Amino acid sequence: MPNAIAEVWTILREMNGASSVIYACLVSFSCGIVVYLIYGRESAKAPRPPLPPGPKPLPLLGNLLDMPVVALCVKYAEWGEKYGDVVHVRALGKHIIILNSYKAATELLHQRGSIHSSRPQTPMVHDPRLMDMDWSFVMKPYGSSWKQHRRLVVQHLGPALAGSLYTVQTESAYQLVKSVLDEPDSFEAHLRHAIGRVILGVSYGLKLQLSNDPHVAMAEKMTRLAGEGLEPKFLVNVFPFMKYIPEWMPGAGFRRLAAAARRATQELLDAPFEATKKEIAAGSTTQSFVRNALTETMDDSDANAQLLEDIKHVAGSMYAAGTDTTMAPIHQLFAVLVVFPNVQHRAQEELDHIIGGADSPSFRLPTFDDRPNLPYIEALLKEVLRWTPGIGSGMPHLSIKEDIYRGWRIPKGSIIFANSWGILKDENVYPDPYVFRPERFLPNENNTVQPDPTAAFGFGRRACPGKHLAESSLFIDIACLLAAFEFLPLKDKDGKDIDLKYVFEPGSGFILRPPAFSCTIRPRSNITERVVRDLEVMNG
Ligand code: HEM
C-alpha cells in the first residue's frame, strides 16, 4: 500500500544513526532486486503498451518520496488533475494505479471485476504468525471463500432484515439523544456507542446494554488493535523474514501488537456468536444476520462446520468494517453544521414542518416513516458522504491478471485505488466541490441533480455490502439529533467563535476520521428537552 511505503520511508528518514543506514541499505537492496526482477525482465521482452501517465519515478525508490504521509487522497486527486483520471505510480517495486473518475472506476472495477477484485496481502495482516486476519471478509483475496462470505451477507443482511433493522436503529437513535442530553460533552463517545450497538444488534440480535456494553467494548478493543496493525508502517511488510523475530526481542513490538490483536479477535469472534446461539436455543426469535444465516445449517455436523465458521467470520467482520466508516462522516457533519449554521437551520425548518416545531406541544422525534418527507435531510446525508467519504482513497483492489485499458497496460499484481475523495471532488461532476451544499442533490429548475455519492462505498464486486445499513443509521441519527438539539460554536477567551474549519482537513489515517473537536450542544427548547427526557428506551 502506498501509505505503508510512505510511512516506512518516513520512519527511515526520522531514524538517526547506524540503524537508519542499515535499514536504508536493506530497503534499497531489496528494492533493487524487486525492481530488477520486475522491470529488468520486462524491458528485455518485446515492446508492450505503455503504463498510464504519472509522476516520474526515481530509480529504485520509484515515487516513494512523492507520497505524503498526511492526506494521501488529496495528493492522489492533485495527480488526477495533472495527469488525467488514470494515474500510475511505482513504489518499492509495486505498480499502483489511481482512479479519479466514476468512468474509470466503473469501467475497470465493475465491468472488469473478474480481474480487479482481489486484495493485496501483507505479512502483518495476513500471516498466521502475526495478525492472522485471513478470516476477515474485507481482507480476503478474490476466490471461493470470499464469494461464500459475500453470498451470506447479500442473502441475510439485505431485505430480510429491513423491518427489524429500523427498530434497532430507531431505538439506538433515541438512546443517543437521551445520552447526549445528559452528557453533551461526551457527544463523540455516545455517537460511537450508538453506531456500534446497531451493527452488533443487526449482526447478532443480542440484547445490548444502553451504555458500556461488554460486547461493544470487546468489538472496540479488537477494532482498535486491528486498526493499529493495519497501519502500513511496519517494516515486516517490507522484510517478511522479520516475522520470525521472537516476541521478547527489542524491536519486536509489532509481534506483541499482532498477538494482542489475535487474542482480541478470537474473543470477538467467539463470545457474541456463542451468546447468540444460546439465546436462539432458549427460544429467542429476534432477527439478526447470525440467526437468519444459521437457519441454513441443519445441525453442528462436520458438513456444516465450515458454514458455521463462515457465518461467525462474516458477523465478526461487520463491526470493524462498519463502525469507523459510519462514524467519520456523521462526526464530521456536526462540525459542518457549526461552521454553516444556515444548513443547520434549513434542516431544522424542514423537520419542524413534519414533526412539529421545537416550541409546539405536538413536537415528536422523527421516525423512518418520515424519511420520504425529509428531502433536505436526505440531501444533507448525501452531501456529507461526498464531503467526507469515510475511506479517502478507497480500499485497495489487486489485479490478478494483466489488463489493457484505453491502450495502457495494467500489470498483473497492480494495486488499484478508486480515490473516493478525488472522484467526489471532481468539479466536472460536482461544481464548486469544496462548498458544502446539500441543494446539489435536490431537484431544482436551474440545475440538474448531481449524481449520488456512491463512490464513497467503493466499486464493483467489492463495493460495500453495508451501504443500506450505513445510510439508514446515518439518516435516523442525523434527523433525531437535529430535531432535538442546536449545535453552536464555543467561544474563545475574547468571546469570539472558535472556528472549526480545521476539522475538514483530511488527516494521516486510512479512515477520514476528524480530529477531536468541541461545540456547544443544547436542547432547542424546553419542549424538545422534555420529550427527549420522557423517552422510554428498551435494551437491545
Ligand atoms: C458510511 C459508512 C460506510 C462507508 C463509507 C463504507 C465504505 C466502504 C468501502 C469504500 C469499501 C471498499 C469497497 C471496495 O473495495 O471497492 C467497503 C467495504 C466493506 N464494507 Fe463498508 N462502508 C460503510 C459502512 C459499512 C457498514 C455499516 C458495514 C457492515 C455492517 C460495512 C461492511 C463492509 C464490508 C464487509 C466490506 C468488504 C466487502 C468486500 O471486501 O467484499 N460497511 N465499505
Image (tube, grey):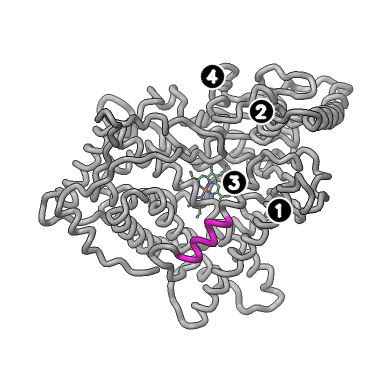
Of the numbered discs 4 and 2, the one sitting upstream in the chain is: 4
Tell me how far mark 1 sits from mark 4, CA to CA: 42 Å
Residue 167 sits inside the magenta stretch: no
Which residue is disc 4 drawn over? 81
Residue drawn at point x = 49 percent, y = 61 percent: 216
Query: In the rendered structure, which disc, 1 or 2, sits on the residue that comes first in sequence?
Result: 1
N-terminal label among 3 and 1: 1
- Secondary structure beneath label 4: helix
Between 407 and 31, the one nearer to me in the picture? 31
Q: Is residue 481 left or right of residue 125?
A: left
Q: CA distance from mark 3 to mark 2?
A: 19 Å
**Mark nearer the viewer, 1 or 4:** 1
Judge depth for marks 1 and 2 and give the one in front: 1
As measured in the structure, the alpha-carbon distance from the residue carrying label 4 to the one carrying label 3 is 27 Å
Does the residue tagged 3 have its C-beta within 8 Å of any atom of ligand 1? yes
Question: Which of the 4 image quadrants contains residue 491?
Answer: top left
Amino acid under label 3?
A: Arg
Mark 1 closeness class: few <14, some 14–19, many ≥20 residues within 10 Å: some
Q: Secondary structure at mark 2?
A: strand
In the rendered view, tell whether residue 234 sits above or below residue 62.
below
Residue ID for mark 3: 461
Q: Gap in Å between the C-alphas at discs 4 and 2?
A: 19 Å
Q: Which residue is mark 2?
A: 405
Pointer 1 residue: 256
Start and end of the magenta stretch? 213-222
Q: In the rendered structure, which amino acid carries the disc numbered 1? A: Arg
Sequence-wise, which precedes: disc 1 or disc 4? Answer: 4
- Residue labelled 1 has its Cβ within 8 Å of some atom of ligand 1: no
Q: x, y (%) of residue 393?
A: 56, 34
Camera-side residue of 246 and 67: 246
Residue 207 x/y as whole percent:
43, 71
Which residue is painted at 27% across and 35% down in the image? 343
